[in-house]
Image (cartoon, coloured by chain):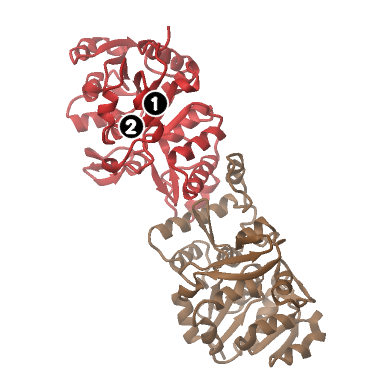
Chain colours: A red, B brown
Amino acid sequence: MSTHLLVLAGGVGGAKLALGLTRLFPPPVLTIVVNTGDDEVFHGLYVCPDLDTVMYTLAGVVNEETGWGVHGDTWRVMEALDRLGGETWFRLGDRDLATHLRRTELLHAGLTLTEATRYLCERFGVRHTVVPMSDDPVRTVVETDMGTMSFQEYFVRHRYVPRVQRLRFEGAEKAQPSPAFIDALAQADALIVCPSNPLLSITPILAIPGVRARLAAVPGVRVAVSPIIGGQAVKGPAAKLLEEVTGEPASCVGVARLYGDLCTHVVIDQQDEERRAAVEALGYRVTVAQTLMTSEEDKVALARLVGRLCGALP
Amino acid sequence: MSTHLLVLAGGVGGAKLALGLTRLFPPPVLTIVVNTGDDEVFHGLYVCPDLDTVMYTLAGVVNEETGWGVHGDTWRVMEALDRLGGETWFRLGDRDLATHLRRTELLHAGLTLTEATRYLCERFGVRHTVVPMSDDPVRTVVETDMGTMSFQEYFVRHRYVPRVQRLRFEGAEKAQPSPAFIDALAQADALIVCPSNPLLSITPILAIPGVRARLAAVPGVRVAVSPIIGGQAVKGPAAKLLEEVTGEPASCVGVARLYGDLCTHVVIDQQDEERRAAVEALGYRVTVAQTLMTSEEDKVALARLVGRLCGALP
């Protein structure tokens, strides 16, 4: 039986599996490490989209329709900001804004991002460990046919229309994993790579020096859940981006290839049964399952499957 | 007839007389220089209480009940921030917050405070020139019997209960007047010191090197309106503070003494008729008038009186 699971997550898909895992495992078992490459400063406020999506999801306050922001939030500030000619393409609800105000205040007061995240999680009643991949700034920069832009400009402002040529993770070369991530790298009995965008959510984590090798050295099962189902992403640009960057049609096979030495197991969707052999040919043990997580039952069921693969559940 | 009036203002009282002046004079005639010693960063946002009170007042959107903030504002963000354990003693309404977000965004983009203020004023439809006293940071620090604190901590958090021993204006010694202030110092035909708190709103302006001497050298009439009426402040700690710092009962005489060489004329309230001789004894020409500004008519009437004293109105 595993005693410590290291979970890598990005935004919506990662948050969903993370929620399932928190329903099955008590806090000490999980370290949920979240991508911060998408972080950006808006209007002077430090915004962490992936950390917030995971936190709001685990707290049960996420806007399930959008996958980000707070359920039932209002838009008073954005409306006023719009009248002042402010940049409002990145929508920040009023309650959501309070999170960014508080985080910015805590960071200005000298807390690390890990500490500020812990503080906010406590306030939102999240008892499991959610940590940034690093307390150092790492910024995903997207080189496209429409120019070089920040991740949020690419993703939100331009709705991932630009064709991506290359991704860079600025600052990654000087970044260190966050303290809880370092501990989990040393202690974990298994690794779970959530069905988040491989290039945008997981690769930034792997770009931190030493992380990929240390993840590959986690003993026991290292399992990735493919976010690509039947050649398509459940949400967002994962499929489009994979095709643009790898030059091949998006599929769970392409995802498995990206993770290479990182994982021992891959979970693919039942729609991709026919691709099982191709993934196995890459050296993985493959499990076919329903991976689309619509209801909470779906999330818990997938989490249970992954937990069993890791030997952490009977 | 004067052609250019230099107006010094702080918060509420200054904003009221400034509003009256803008009803009588077209934009090129007035330069309204506002105290920035009260400015503070809250939650990473750059907040300029006096500039905003003047801007909101001239724009006709001020909350007249409080004298600050936007009329009819809502408090969604503050409510959420309160639940997150944020510091909410400095109340920022949702619409008001948008102003601070936009200003912070503009300052981060490299604009000076003068430029950011001009931008915001344009958006709020304020056509008259409202400028910060300086684009450099000057911070009013209050030394009290309860310890040393920032102006906002003293004023808002502790509701000016602490007994003030000394005021300091950090950064003043290295600050320069803002460009429009420098122009007005060179061009003004008259000076109007609004009925703002002499120690907290006007003294910070005078603390910028060279300003006091250049103001005293403005040709023509230099008139101050006493904010102390019958020994009391209309609003805020002016009277209490004057007593604590000067050791004398607050009165228009004490105000006049503070302004010393700065002004040639003082306007005192009709309630202070009996103190006329004492103010005249300090070398001033004194006008007795109704200085309490409740209605818009009051503001325009006092502005007209001051404008006439300056020779700028028939």
Q: Amino acid at mark 1?
A: Gly
Q: Which residue is mark 2?
A: A201
Q: Label 1, on which residue?
A: A14
From the viewer's perspective, tell me whether residue B262 is left or right of residue A86: right
In terms of sequence position, does the residue under pointer 2 or pointer 1 come before the other?
1
Percent of width and height locating residue A288: 31, 10
Disc 1 is placed on an element classified as helix
Output the chain of dot 1: A
**Residue at 39% of width from left, 40% of height from top?**
A135
Disc 2 + disc 1, Cβ < 8 Å = yes
Rendered-image quadrant of the N terminus of chain A: top left
| Looking at the image, residue A231 lies above or below residue B87 | above
Query: In which quadrant is the C terminus of chain A drawn?
Result: top left
Left of A312 or right of it: where is B154?
right
Judged left or right of residue B217, residue B198 is right
Q: Is residue A88 above or below residue A7?
A: below
The answer to whether residue B186 is seen in the rendering is yes
